[in-house]
Amino acid sequence: MFDLTGKHVCYVADCGGIALETSKVLMTKNIAKLAILQSVENPQAIAQLQSIKPSTQIFFWTYDVTMAREEMKKYFDEVMVQMDYIDVLINGATLCDENNIDATINTNLTGMMNTVATVLPHMDRKMGGSGGLIVNVTSVIGLDPSPVFCAYSASKFGVIGFTRSLADPLYYSQNGVAVMAVCCGPTRVFVDRELKAFLEYGQSFADRLRRAPCQSTSVCGQNIVNAIERSENGQIWIADKGGLELVKLHWYWHMADQFLHYMQSNDEDDQD
Amino acid sequence: MFDLTGKHVCYVADCGGIALETSKVLMTKNIAKLAILQSVENPQAIAQLQSIKPSTQIFFWTYDVTMAREEMKKYFDEVMVQMDYIDVLINGATLCDENNIDATINTNLTGMMNTVATVLPHMDRKMGGSGGLIVNVTSVIGLDPSPVFCAYSASKFGVIGFTRSLADPLYYSQNGVAVMAVCCGPTRVFVDRELKAFLEYGQSFADRLRRAPCQSTSVCGQNIVNAIERSENGQIWIADKGGLELVKLHWYWHMADQFLHYMQSNDEDDQD
């Protein structure tokens, strides 16, 4: 269980409805501070959020998740002046543009990882932070492949690999920062977007997707917050069809035992 | 079964031993042409390869997998002048630099996907090509997370997501290009490299990895070619500890049934 009361939450959001709906739910949780980092300004949404809980301090910054690491470091130094510290970092910036592989990967994967690498020292228990939680909001096609969105799926598989790697006890036991992911199923954000398949053979499938049965952004946002409150380090959740399911993680590399045994042993007589 | 006899093979290779050893085995398979695209020149290796089979034509080009798509398109137009066509594209360029997330992702994932997107039209049966095979040489930590190499693992998870997505019958049935991946276990290429962990807490583990029991590059190269010869579209293989294992792929998104049923139905009365 993770108690959001009094927490300082930093949300790297896209312009989509999921981030706004998730933020609305966060505002009902008595959090102390909410920083919203988003590519475009949306003062109306901020006002709407503030009206839910006037005593929670909301900060807004425009943020380009694809900025260079050095620039990002300076950027978060500014953010920390207002936030003091960050308990929860939510990574929700996302792009699905199969015609632009670079932008899709840079936004969904590289940008998210650079953000984590930049914010983590501020949260790290051994570096003066108080520990906390990193939440990657991602997609079910980061778990299973997509016949339509090959680049997007690749980026989201990457998010899962990063989440699971960083959640390793090797890190968590030292820095006290738990890492988790919530994979959203089809949600009503596609409807207004023109979606291109990776190859044109998939286009009719992509077109059809826009009219497919989808959960609402509000129920998805509610379940993202439910997952956060119920989460333990390393967990992956699926928020789909209005429900929430804990993923039983699969391991493929059965031949690893001997290797791991070696890596964990204290034998000084290492093989060459 | 995939018969390499007479084939035109294009190998996007890194400077590591796995690519060279794999190429040596390919040279014993009576292939007609081998194009090696690599970041640095290595005339000695080319001479060694040529000596294995003088009648196979070998071409070498320096190649930066991170070049822009437009540039890449022009580059492969040149390659195709010599190759006429490509039956097999092997993607083996790889980088593990946890201090440089951008370079690691760009090389292992974005660069590979851009290469595939550029070469695919030349192979596509519906675009004048003859179909063929795309082979992504990747790592077991693209299947299971890594406690040490978070960025590398993320990039390799992405490769698996892309491979599985592009192998969908939706594409394969149209373009005739099969897609597969071979995930190498710990192989004796780490030994000479200084490996940095994503966070310093993992560094002693990374240092230890350099002296861990590893398979040789030659047995790994042999098994990569074995996997190619035995492959069917969409398969993922593990080449580890001198062995070769077909991966039984796991699907997580059980709630997808209703959604997929909708997507595959011909019902005109779509839900909104």
Image (spheres, coloured by chain):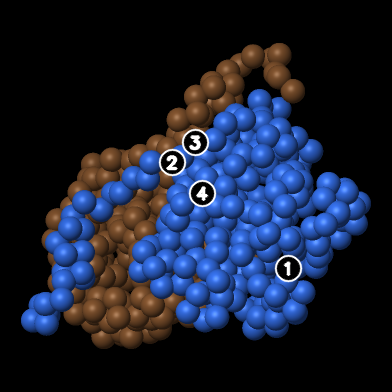
Chain colours: A brown, B blue
Asked whether, in this view, residue B134 is left or right of residue A62, the answer is right
Q: Which mark is residue B247?
A: 2
> Could you classify mark 1 by the number of other residues whose Cα lies within 10 Å: few (under 14), some (14-19), or many (20 or more)?
some
The reply to whether callout 1 and callout 3 are in contact (CB within 8 Å) is: no
Contact flag, marks 2 and 3 (Cβ < 8 Å): yes
What residue appears at the point 71 percent right and 19 percent down from the top-left corner? A271
Q: Nearer the viewer, mark 4 or mark 3?
A: 4
Q: Disc 1: which chain?
A: B
Q: Are marks 4 and 3 on the same chain?
A: yes
Kind of residue sitting beneath label 4? Met
Q: Which mark is residue B245?
A: 3
Check if mark 1's residue and mark 2's residue have beta carbons within 8 Å: no
Work out how far the residue at label 2 is from the one at label 4, CA to CA, in angstroms: 17 Å
Query: Which mark sits nearer the N-terminus, 4 or 3?
Result: 4
- Label 4 to label 3, Cα distance in Å? 16 Å
Q: Are marks 2 and 4 on the same chain?
A: yes
Marks 1/2: CA–CA distance: 31 Å
N-terminal of the pair, mark 1 or mark 2, is 1
